[in-house]
Amino acid sequence: MVNPLDRAGFEARLRAIGAERYHDKHPFHAMLHGGRCTPTQVRAWVINRYAYQSRIPMKDAAFMSRCADPDLRRAWRSRIEDHDGGITEGGGIRRWLKLAEAVGLDPDYVASERGILPATRFAVDAYVRFVRDMPLLDAVASSLTELFAPKIHAQRIEGLLAHYAFANPSSLSYFRQRLTEAPKDVAFGLAFVLDHADTAEKQDAAAAALEFKTDVLWAQLDALWSAYVEPGRIPPGGWNGVDGVTGDAT
């Protein structure tokens, strides 16, 4: 029988997954943050990332539908509120559409999800299914990429402000808001995983769930790279670089 890691050792194992596999290491982000993306590449990123943003409250609703513990539901539901917002106040999805408008895209076109790359759609829907179908511990563990998100948001804000005319406090409000929202979410999620992964088998499953989530994020950027960078082969149904464009170059 293999003994589980102690709390500190298991947290270190989880953080090592991010150090090795988080998508901040993808070359597309180096291009984006370094100001080397074309307007088409920036817009393609905004369009495809919307598919992921739209699925976050959906996966959280799927998670909550499985929770018999009202305390867990209460703790988790703020995630839906953060992304969906209220009737008049825009949450994260509406802030993302502000970014879409700033880069010269019709927000209604982006919200329609027309032009989403097939691989992106497959990845984000797989994430919803994972959270819906896997054990609650695995579902929570998959959210722990939030451990690594504040760093990439800070890098993104700095890089976009330095290199792109569209970047300003309004257009980048999604990322600024996540700097305060994500730490709250991840503190709860990390504590839940550390508390409940009390066997070696559960620790292995939680680590595998986090690896799965890094794969979901990485796969989206691989799809963008293939379609809009190298070799530049846009698959059937992918955004053609023209539809939904309303403004000048970014």
Image (cartoon, rainbow, N blue to C red):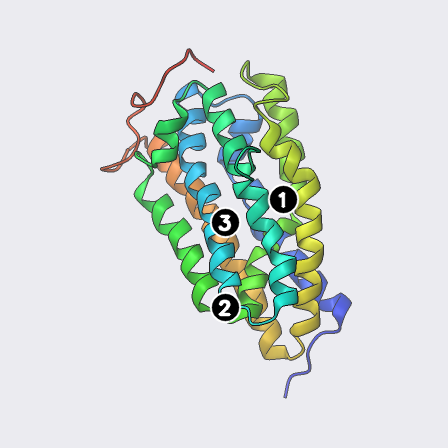
- Against 36, residue 179 (above or below) is below
The span from disc 2 to disc 3 (Cα, nearest Å) is 14 Å
Provide the secondary structure element on which disc 1 rests: helix
Q: Residues within 10 Å of mark 1 (few under 14, many from 20)?
A: many
Which amino acid does the dot numbered 1 rest on?
Ala
Q: Position of residue 32 (x, y in %)?
A: 52, 28
Nearer the N terminus, badge 2 or badge 3? Answer: 3
**Circle 1 is placed at which residue position?**
149
Cα gap from disc 3 to disc 1, whole angstroms:
17 Å
Q: Earlier in the sequence, mark 1 or mark 2?
A: 2
Identify the mark at residue 40; answer none if there is no mark: none
Q: Residue at x 50, y 37 (%)?
A: 93
Q: Nearer the viewer, residue 118 or 112?
A: 112
Work out whether residue 64 or residue 211 is closer to the camera in this orientation and state it.
Answer: 64
Where residue 184 appears, x then y in whole percent? 71, 50
Quadrant for the N terminus, please: bottom right
Q: Give the labeled residue for mark 3.
A: 57
Q: Quickly name the residue at label 2.
A: 66
The residue lying toward the viewer, choosing from 16 and 52, is: 52
| Quarter of the image where one finds residue 210 | bottom right
At mark 3, the secondary structure is helix
Please report the residue visible at 63 percent of the width from the left and 38 percent of the height from the top: 152
Residue 21's x, y, as percent?
Answer: 56, 51
Regarding residue 229, the answer to whether it shows in the image is no
